[in-house]
Image: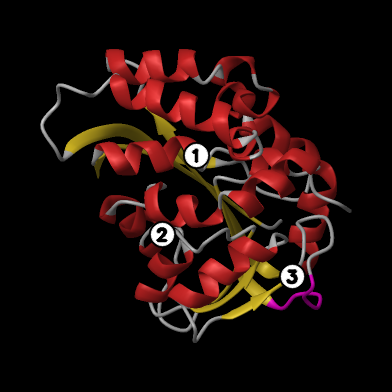
Amino acid sequence: MEIDEVAARGFEAGAAAYELARPGYPDEAVAILAGPVGIGPGAVVCDLAAGTGKLTRRLVELQASVMAVEPVPGMRAQLQAVLPAIEVVEGTAEAIPLPDASVEVVTVAQAFHWFDAATALTEIARVLQPGGRVVLLWNERDEATPWVAEMSRLIRWHERTVSRYQHVDWADVVAESGRFTPLEETAIDWDQSLTRDLLADRVRSISYIAAMPGAPRERLAAEVVSLVSRLPEPFPMPYRCRIQWARLR
């Protein structure tokens, strides 16, 4: 299955900005992966739609045996540059290039909303070993901070179809597949340290903005940066990281 056209163009164009400015995952989230989720040394993990490897590198820190699957060439190139020892392969969630029952865990960080959920969950179940786990991670900007809320208004975040993932009940989506135990969840509030230059790249890394022509894209980045013109650098970008996981029935 082909990926969304805007996503493909945007993530290809914005891969370098994505690597520079997108948040990683906090230590507290990694502790959940190591603890309740059970990713430890030697665990065989498929990091699906791995992007530039923001989560992949944290899985490597847990000494897991990781294969990264990513459909966008520019994102794969960034990932391979950061983690040259990791196997990185082209593929989508709807056609995972792995044998049946070959991995213990499938992780999906900041990407499940791009998938055809029913098809992807069928494929994830296929590649998982008995008792294997699927894990969804989400970094969501905390719009209780006024400038972050204004940033979302400027970039028209809530008008974009892909932004609606924050309002989807993923527990229902996973339950509908009939293949997994009920989704468990925990959430962690944390801050990413940014500069104004990194905030501009954060804006440029958003797929539908990265796909824009250069002039309007740069105007939009400048508008967002103006929101923090009086903040001392570095300044915090507040996030809530949600970690959700379930076991294969």
Residue stretch rendered in magenta on the structure: 97-102
At label 2, the amino acid type is Leu
State the CA–CA distance, disc 1 to disc 3.
Answer: 24 Å
For mark 1, give the secondary structure: helix
For mark 3, give the secondary structure: loop
- Evaluate if marks 1 and 3 touch, with contact meaning CB atoms under 8 Å apart: no
Which residue is located at x 10 percent, y 31 percent? Answer: 232
Would you identify the image quadrant in which residue 143 lies?
top left
Horizontal arrangement in the rendering, residue 151 relative to residue 171 (left or right): left
Which residue is located at x 28 percent, y 31 percent? Answer: 238
State the CA–CA distance, disc 1 to disc 2.
Answer: 30 Å
- Image vertical order of residue 168 relative to residue 124, above or below: above
Can residue 105 be seen in this snapshot?
Answer: no
Of circles 3 and 2, which is in front?
A: 3
**Type of secondary structure dominating the magenta stretch:** loop
- Compare residues 155 and 161 and report the one nearer the observer: 155
Image quadrant in which the C terminus is located: bottom right
Q: Which residue is mark 1?
A: 204
Of circles 1 and 3, which is in front?
A: 1
Would you identify the image quadrant in which residue 82 lies?
bottom left
Residue 98 shown in magenta: yes
**x then y, percent, for residue 132:** 63, 65
**x then y, percent, for residue 208:** 64, 33
Residue situated furthest left in the rendering: 232
Horizontal arrangement in the rendering, residue 173 relative to residue 137 (left or right): right
For mark 2, give the secondary structure: helix
Q: Which residue is mark 3?
A: 90
Can residue 212 be seen in this snapshot?
Answer: yes
State the CA–CA distance, disc 3 to disc 2.
Answer: 25 Å
**Mark number displayed over residue 33:** 2
